[in-house]
């Protein structure tokens, strides 16, 4: 295809894709929030770049430009656009139904943002019980772990790897120039503020043990420096080099993850549900209000 980005296809191209049996979407679900020295859309950009690469590998289309969803504890940043979980749920579910009615059955949501599951997983579960068509959330942190199991050289420093991938995503999206160059960045002062913020909220450590992820209780960061890594470039050349390095790492991660494999699994799940399980339990047909 000329492009795998749904937003950039023509009507004729999308119609032809569906006519030829295509039914797969990779939808990037982003966030706009403070993130250290990176632009506030960095987690959105990484999800978009990954969605496009996965679509290319799994004969799908990628939906981008969905940057405004629940942010959470980063609301202390005046740049953070904090949308309620319910508002994000309603919007995302409306979008899923719109694409489903067009003929897309295998739908994957890609996210980089920690609390994204609060919105996305709820949509996945409710949509399934309303349509009996399974859709899936791909958290990029988990994608990294699966790729690592398949031989991807992730590196020892997880945050450093995330930073490389973010630089690579901006490179992939032809937006590397939006990452600022900061020759005077004071790393030690930044780290001191991070330690200060962590010390102020010592009580959160044990509270987090009560839940499997963020969202079990509401909170704010104490200091702006607590969110986002130590991402910065001293020169334009250094930025370009890291962008190239990150782009290759991102491509390698997607290759090792093998999105086509998971697309096949999702299709098999849908067939099992509708061809084997639902026929055995007739009452399940009553729990299918969608027309």
Image (cartoon, rainbow, N blue to C red):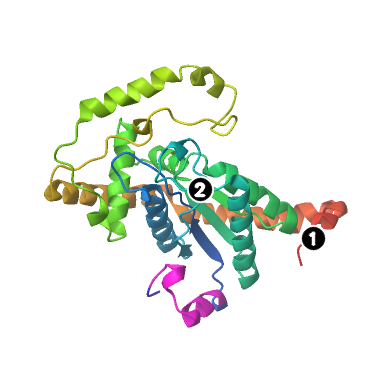
Label 2 neighbour load within 10 Å: few <14, some 14-19, many 20+: many
Helix, strand or loop status at disc 2: strand
Question: Magenta region's main secondary structure?
Answer: helix
Quarter of the picture containing the C terminus is bottom right
Quarter of the picture containing the N terminus is bottom left
Is residue 106 at least partly visible in the picture?
A: yes
Real-space Cα distance between discs 1 and 2?
26 Å
Q: Residue furthest bottom?
A: 12
Residue corresponding to mark 1: 289
> What mark, if any, has residue 249 been given in the picture?
none
Residue corresponding to mark 2: 138
| Chain part drawn in magenta | 3-18
Helix, strand or loop status at disc 1: loop
When the figure is inspected, residue 204 is found, relative to residue 139, above or below; the finding is above
Q: Quadrant of residue 54?
A: bottom left
N-term-proximal mark, 1 vs 2: 2
Left or right: residue 60 compared with residue 96:
left
Residue visible at 63% across and 51% down in the picture: 123
Q: Position of residue 227 (x, y in %)?
A: 38, 34
- Whether tag 1 and tag 2 are in contact, CB under 8 A, the answer is no
When the figure is inspected, residue 113 is found, relative to residue 44, above or below; the finding is above
Q: Position of residue 100 (x, y in %)?
A: 63, 66
Residue visible at 32% across and 38% down in the picture: 36
């Amino acid at each position: 295809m000329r492009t795998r980005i749904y937003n950039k296809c023509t009507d004729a191209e999308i119609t032809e894709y569906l006519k030829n049996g295509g039914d797969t979407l990779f939808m990037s679900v982003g966030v706009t929030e403070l993130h250290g020295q990176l632009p506030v859309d960095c987690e959105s950009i990484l999800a978009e770049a990954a969605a496009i690469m996965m679509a290319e590998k799994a004969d799908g289309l990628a939906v981008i430009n969905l940057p405004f969803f629940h942010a959470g504890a980063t609301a202390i940043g005046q740049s953070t656009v904090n949308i309620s979980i319910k508002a994000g749920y309603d919007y995302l579910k409306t979008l899923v139904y719109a694409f489903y009615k067009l003929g897309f059955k295998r739908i994957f949501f890609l996210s980089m943002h920690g609390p994204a599951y609060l919105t996305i997983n709820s949509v996945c579960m409710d949509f399934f019980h309303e349509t009996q068509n399974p859709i899936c959330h791909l958290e990029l942190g988990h994608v990294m772990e699966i790729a690592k199991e398949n031989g991807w050289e992730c590196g020892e420093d997880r945050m450093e790897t995330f930073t490389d991938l973010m630089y690579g995503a901006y490179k992939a999206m032809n937006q590397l120039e939006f990452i600022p160059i900061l020759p005077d960045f004071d790393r030690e002062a930044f780290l001191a503020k991070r330690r200060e913020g962590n010390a102020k909220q010592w009580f959160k450590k044990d509270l987090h043990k009560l839940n499997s992820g963020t969202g079990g209780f509401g909170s704010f960061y104490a200091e702006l420096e607590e969110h986002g890594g130590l991402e910065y470039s001293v020169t334009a050349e250094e930025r370009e080099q890291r962008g190239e390095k990150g782009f290759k790492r991102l491509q390698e991660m997607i290759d090792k993850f093998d999105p086509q494999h998971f697309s096949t699994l999702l299709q098999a799940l849908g067939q099992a549900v509708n061809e084997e399980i639902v026929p055995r339990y007739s009452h399940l047909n009553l729990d299918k209000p969608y027309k």
